[in-house]
Amino acid sequence: MDNNGTSNERELTENVQPWWQRFVAGLNEFYHAPYRQTMARAARDEEDFFMLLMFAESLGIDNPASFYTLELQPLFLENFHEWHTRMGMDRCPFDHVGCC
């Protein structure tokens, strides 16, 4: 009888666990869905500001942190085209970067 009891308990926990995980996932989605667009916009704005800080010296804007951001420019150069088009610059403002 113990074998049947333990096997029934295993089947019950195997069937209940996916339901519980789906329920938690649904609650998580219900909570996060209204804020997803706002959080994505805030993250994009933060990334735009960071890109401006990195490329400010190249754009002719004094940047007190240019010593530190100069090392990061090659890493973010592949995202530069998306950034400068989003900022309203149709063409790349740099002569030495051929992204457009």
Image (cartoon, rainbow, N blue to C red):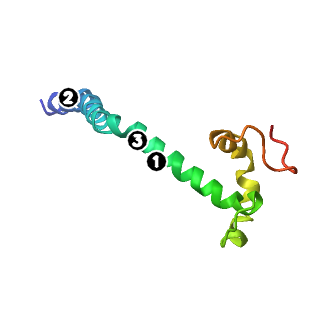
Pointer 2 residue: 12
Q: Secondary structure at mark 1?
A: helix
Pointer 3 residue: 38
User: Which residue is at a point 66% across and 40% down the rendered structure image?
Assistant: 88
Separation of residues labelled 2 and 3 (CA atoms) = 40 Å
CB within 8 Å, label 3 to label 1: yes
User: Which residue is at a point 47% across and 42% down the rendered structure image?
Assistant: 41
Query: Crowding near pointer 1: few (<14 within 10 Å), some, many (20+)?
Result: few
Instruction: Specify which label sits upstream in the sequence, 2 or 3.
Output: 2
Q: Is residue 32 left or right of residue 45?
A: left
Q: Quadrant of the N terminus?
A: top left
CB within 8 Å, label 2 to label 1: no
Q: Residue 31 in the image: state x and y as whole percent.
A: 28, 38
User: Which residue is at a point 71% across and 69% down the rendered structure image?
Assistant: 66
Snapshot quadrant of residue 53: bottom right
Pointer 1 residue: 42
Q: Secondary structure at mark 3?
A: helix
User: Which residue is at a point 81% across and 37% down the rendered structure image?
Assistant: 100
